[in-house]
């Protein structure tokens, strides 16, 4: 087993980024023992500044600072108030960028997209759970990574910690994928299950916000944009379809009546926001996102309020189902570790 050091820059220290710092603190010795990799966190950035130390930062301290809602520029000696994430990426001595900034599809995908472009251009590997850059610039970024001879991994962009993309891209190679059904969004399932219990829309939304599943503006989730973005990534990466958000027929959950939701619940069915890709006779795919009642015999109909899943129907491998219960964002954050190991560990 070869031994090597991997110098990491982490951009974005919200729910996923700070948890990933904690994972580095908890798992570093195990990763060294099992894989011979020294994962060295040399730089971090949030919206108010950066911290950089070429000899390595303490990831546990990074996690503590951010868990206390403090800016990362308060990191002792290494913190830099007002320093930009892009500047850190452009100048840090690093091998790999972990990009976990907030999703931004309305303003060009930044800061995530610019940071990923800069890292790839410098010859750095990139892993990211940030959907925005992949939705907006998938083919550009894949080509740039290939030109620079580095890897771009984004397994955490679809269905949290579920390896939905790896399953489709790697394990179904050689197959013709006839149909993809996915429940890739946690918050809509949580809201729909609350409504099925007779809770009002306002109370269900309040509970979703209190549990950290909904933003102050829940439109991104409730109107189906999040699920549509994940379907676009599946289409590009797994189905090799150059899709964009405009190619998805999208219906959110706000138009579903309480009466319909509760009637389906009485029948033993559950409503879920389903992302669907269906192969057409011409070889293309029809892409849609819409709420659907699912029976308990449907593999996605058995998902709990914190469950996500995907069903691949193929010509030679049969129908393959994968699901996950994700009680908190830790599995989504851990996809960055999985992506790093996919890049550096080869049997």
Image (tube, rainbow, N blue to C red):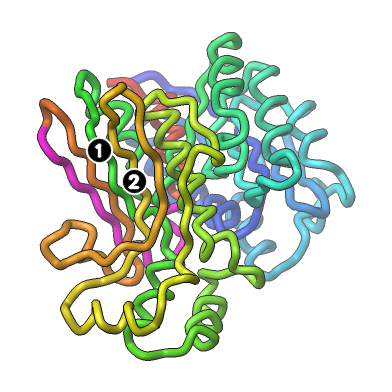
Helix, strand or loop at mark 1:
strand
Q: Residue at x 20, y 23 (%)?
A: 175
In which quarter of the view is residue 261 placed?
A: bottom left
Q: Residue at x 52, y 44 (%)?
A: 129
- Residue 165 forms part of the magenta stretch: no
Region in magenta: 318-332
Quadrant of the frame with the N terminus = top left
User: How far apart are the alpha carbons under marks 2 and 1?
Assistant: 7 Å
Q: From the viewer's perspective, is residue 207 above or below residue 2?
A: below
Looking at the rendered structure, which numbered label has been put on residue 27? none
Helix, strand or loop at mark 2:
strand
Q: Where in the figure is residue 203, as x and y percent of width and height?
A: 51, 88
Density class for disc 1 (Cα within 10 Å; few <14, some 14-19, many ≥20) is some
Q: Nearer the viewer, residue 135 or 287?
A: 287
In which quarter of the view is residue 302 placed?
A: bottom left
Quadrant of the frame with the C terminus = top left
Q: Nearer the viewer, residue 156 or 56?
A: 156
Quickly name the residue at label 2.
276
Looking at the image, do the residues carrying marks 2 and 1 touch, with CB atoms under 8 Å apart?
Answer: yes
N-terminal label among 2 and 1? 1
In which quarter of the view is residue 93 placed?
A: top right
Q: Where in the figure is residue 180, as x and y percent of width and height?
A: 28, 41
Q: From the viewer's perspective, is residue 133 above or below residue 151?
A: below
- What residue occupies the far right of the structure in this picture? 82
- Residue 329 forms part of the magenta stretch: yes
Quickly name the residue at label 1.
179
């Amino acid at each position: 087993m070869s031994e090597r050091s991997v110098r990491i820059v982490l951009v974005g220290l919200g729910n996923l980024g700070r948890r990933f710092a904690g994972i580095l603190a908890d798992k570093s010795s195990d990763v060294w023992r099992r894989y011979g990799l020294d994962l060295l966190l040399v730089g971090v950035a949030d919206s108010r500044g950066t911290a950089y130390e070429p000899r390595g930062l303490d990831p546990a301290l990074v996690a503590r600072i951010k868990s206390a809602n403090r800016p990362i520029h308060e990191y002792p000696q290494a913190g830099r108030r007002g320093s930009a994430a892009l500047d850190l990426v452009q100048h840090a001595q690093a091998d790999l960028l972990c990009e976990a900034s907030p999703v931004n599809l309305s303003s060009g995908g930044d800061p995530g997209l610019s940071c990923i472009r800069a890292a790839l251009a410098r010859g750095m590997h990139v892993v990211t759970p940030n959907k925005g850059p992949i939705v907006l610039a998938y083919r550009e970024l894949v080509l740039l990574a290939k030109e620079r001879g580095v890897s771009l991994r984004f397994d955490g962009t679809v269905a949290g910690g579920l390896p939905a993309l790896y399953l489709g891209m790697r394990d179904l190679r050689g197959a013709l994928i006839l149909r993809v059904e996915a429940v890739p969004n946690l918050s809509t399932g949580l809201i729909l299950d609350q409504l099925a219990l007779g809770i009002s829309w306002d109370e269900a939304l309040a509970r979703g916000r209190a549990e950290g599943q909904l933003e102050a503006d829940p439109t991104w989730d409730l109107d189906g944009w999040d699920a549509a973005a994940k379907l676009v990534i599946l289409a590009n990466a797994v189905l090799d379809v150059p899709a964009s958000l405009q190619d998805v027929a999208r219906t959110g959950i706000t138009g579903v009546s309480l009466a319909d939701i509760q009637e389906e619940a009485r029948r033993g069915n559950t409503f879920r926001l389903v992302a669907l890709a269906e192969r057409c006779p011409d070889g293309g795919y029809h892409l849609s996102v819409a709420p659907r009642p699912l029976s308990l015999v449907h593999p996605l109909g058995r998902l709990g309020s914190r469950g996500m899943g995907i069903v691949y129907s193929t010509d030679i491998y049969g129908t393959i189902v994968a699901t996950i219960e994700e009680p908190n964002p830790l599995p989504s954050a851990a996809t960055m570790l999985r992506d790093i190991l996919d890049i550096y560990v080869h049997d």
